[in-house]
């Protein structure tokens, strides 16, 4: 499924924030409108085929790298990367344990 189609469900659970970073997969008018309707400023790089380029700050976007590194570090755990657990609560517990181990040690 495309990122911009799944964004609707993700944005419903969005907490109050001033700025939201997203990758090019979320660069659509509908996603931008939904983000702005929640009072948040989107910082999403425009796609190459977009005629009108939206406001984008590369300096702020560099902070997104920390989030990508965190997901990469969690995926080093085989149980997290392949999601062996059937229940969401057990999977969330495994993520918490992996995060504790990888950031505490």
Image: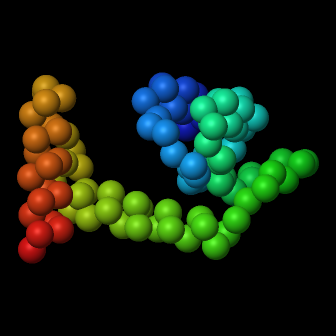
Name the residue located 15 percent from the left edge and 37 percent from the top edge. 91
Name the residue located 11 percent from the left edge and 69 percent from the top edge. 104
Residue lying farthest right?
Answer: 51
Any part of residue 93 in sight = yes
Name the residue located 32 percent from the left edge and 62 percent from the top edge. 70
In this picture, residue 34 sits left or right of residue 13: right
Is 32 situated above or below 59? above
Any part of residue 24 in sight = no
Q: Position of residue 54 (x, y in %)?
A: 81, 51
Q: Position of residue 71 (x, y in %)?
A: 33, 57
Q: Position of residue 96 (x, y in %)?
A: 14, 49
Q: Position of residue 94 (x, y in %)?
A: 11, 45
Name the residue located 40 percent from the left edge and 60 percent from the top edge. 67
Q: Indicate the quadrant containing the C terminus: top left, top right, bottom left or bottom right.
A: bottom left
Question: Relative to the observer, which residue lies in front, 95 or 42?
Answer: 42
In this picture, residue 76 sits left or right of residue 24: left
């Amino acid at each position: 499924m495309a990122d911009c189609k799944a964004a609707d469900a993700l944005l419903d659970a969005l907490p109050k924030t001033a700025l939201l970073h997203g990758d090019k997969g979320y660069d659509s008018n509908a996603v931008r409108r939904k983000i702005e309707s929640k009072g948040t400023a989107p910082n999403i790089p425009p796609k190459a085929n977009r005629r009108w380029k939206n406001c984008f700050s590369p300096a702020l976007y560099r902070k997104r790298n920390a989030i990508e590194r965190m997901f990469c570090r969690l995926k080093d755990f085989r149980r997290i990367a392949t999601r062996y657990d059937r229940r969401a609560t057990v999977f969330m517990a495994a993520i918490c344990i992996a995060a504790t181990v990888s950031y505490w040690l």
